[in-house]
Image: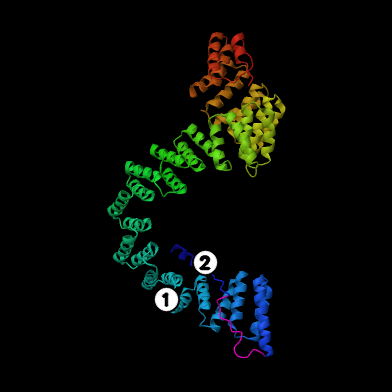
Amino acid sequence: MKQFLYFCAFLLVLTSCGTRKIASGKTNSQDDLAYIQTFHNAMRYKVKGQLNNAIQAFDSCLLIRPTDDAAAYGLSQCYLQLDNKSKAAEYTEMASKLDPDNIWYTQELGYMYYNQGKFTEAEKCFAKMVKIQPNNVDWLFAHSEILKRLGRQNDAINSLNKMEDQLGVLPDLSIQKFELYVSLKQDEKGIAEIQKARDVYPDDLGLIGTLVDYYFSKREISKAQSMLVELVKNDPSNARANLALGDLYYRQMNKPEAYKYFKAAFLGTGLDIDTKMSVLLDMYEKQVVVDKELIELADLLIASYPDNAKGYSVKGDLMLRNGQKEEALAAYKNALKFEENKFPIWNQVLMLEYELVKFEDLYKDARACSALFPTISSVQLLYTIACVQLDRFQEAIDAADLGKDLVVDDPATEAEFYAQKGDALFGLKRYKEGADAYDKALAIFPSNSLTKNNYAMRLALANMDLPKAEKLIDEVLEGKPNQAPYIDTKGMILFRQGKFKQALEQFTIADELDKENKNYIEHMGDAFFKLGDTNKALELWKKALSLGSKNKLLTKKIQSKIYVDPEY
């Protein structure tokens, strides 16, 4: 019966149903012949879709016969096809008034009034219609809907009862009667309607769900629960019943029982992938730390739909919520195998690769993503960053030049493109151009501490404009005095200025804040060497090498036992 719920969208085109009154008596007068010819022309125009011509012809018919209902109805249909609802309504009313006994006009008028929200007028039409055809279930249902709108619940129930006499007991009709009885505060009658329907459809979830919701609303939890338990006992593979029972236990904070029934629901029959997804996402939203059982449900979803990206994607969300970034990344990358055009999944992959310092993977994936989504500046930025980190400096410069032109009303991102370009230019030892690019970055977004730090470090490593480098890093440290990278940069500037003892102090503080950082350890070794302690310097250089220092000349320093400017 659900198809009846959409009757309010109908405006039926019933050109074949209206009674025609072309010949009432002799038709040999000039007026009769003119009318017949004009009407036929109007119908031909209408059939051909030449609606404006049809309207002119039907208007001419009304000039000849002002009381002709068929011409008025023809006009209403033409205006309806032209989406001129006011005109269509005007001529529908005219046709119905000219021939009040034509049931099809009455029907058209009834639906028209309903769509206009004129429920009192619509009810009169449908009351007339069901009186003429008391077995027409479409009209009975429409009448019941209108009666509900008018607050006439008892009359609506009577109309539904007449439908039931024609169709037999149906769950949807019983649920509607239940709702009407409850609105009348006659709950027992409503429950009786549901029970009567359950005698015919004992496992219908709509009926059970209606009672479960009702008992929940009345805080009669035990009744709701007992119904669901009974249903699951009789039908263990009923996924929807298991799901409802699992939800009930979850509301009661009984997670072990809840997950038992959720698992049965995911293994049972009757749940599609979107329903399962909604279960996972609903619980995901409620959990700060995701339960391992919820991840197991995600694995069951993947097992059921191994070629669908949705299961992998939701598992990625769950793992990410738990801070398991490697596992989340693997899940998202699996999702991309089956749905590579979903940018949100790509975005998660790229961001995780960036956070996990997987620059080889980031380079490959950002490049692939930029081919699929060439206008998204954030993708181009991550591609640029990966190029810089992999010493693909010219490629990074080209990527930055392309990316900055994609930015719209986002100064921070535009500035970052210039900063990355500056990094690449310094990497190519094009120091003046690199400094210009960094200056542009800071002109666009002057408050970026990271850009200032990186610029200062680049100047220090290049041993150029040290006063400017010191000014930049001092501005950063004023607001963020306890950040190891910034303290290390300060130490490097002091080192370049020949203030080796002060530099060592800064490097040592950075190391204490971030133990086992290869860069800080190597820098301490450099400072010890300059202060004359070669053995300590060698010890620290070797440790930095074991930790994976990117300085290409570090091995040379160790072998020669002589300080050499780093080359990254």
Magenta extent? 16-28
Image quadrant for the N terminus?
bottom left
Image quadrant for the C terminus?
top right
159 or 351: which is nearer to us?
Answer: 159
Picture quadrant where residue 97 is located: bottom right
Question: In the image, which disc is placed on residue 493?
Answer: none
Left or right: 203, with 19 as reference point: left
Q: Is residue 165 magenta?
A: no
Q: Amino acid at mark 1?
A: Pro
Horizontal and vertical percent position of residue 513: 49, 24
Q: Which residue is mark 1?
A: 134
User: Is residue 127 among what the camera can see?
Assistant: yes
Instruction: Report the residue at 35% width, 64% height from top.
Output: 178
Horizontal and vertical percent position of residue 197: 34, 62
Q: Amino acid at mark 2?
A: Ala
Picture quadrant where residue 56 is located: bottom right
Horizontal and vertical percent position of residue 240: 38, 50
In this view, 504 is above or below 367:
above
Question: In the image, which disc is placed on residue 9?
Answer: 2
Q: Is residue 25 magenta?
A: yes
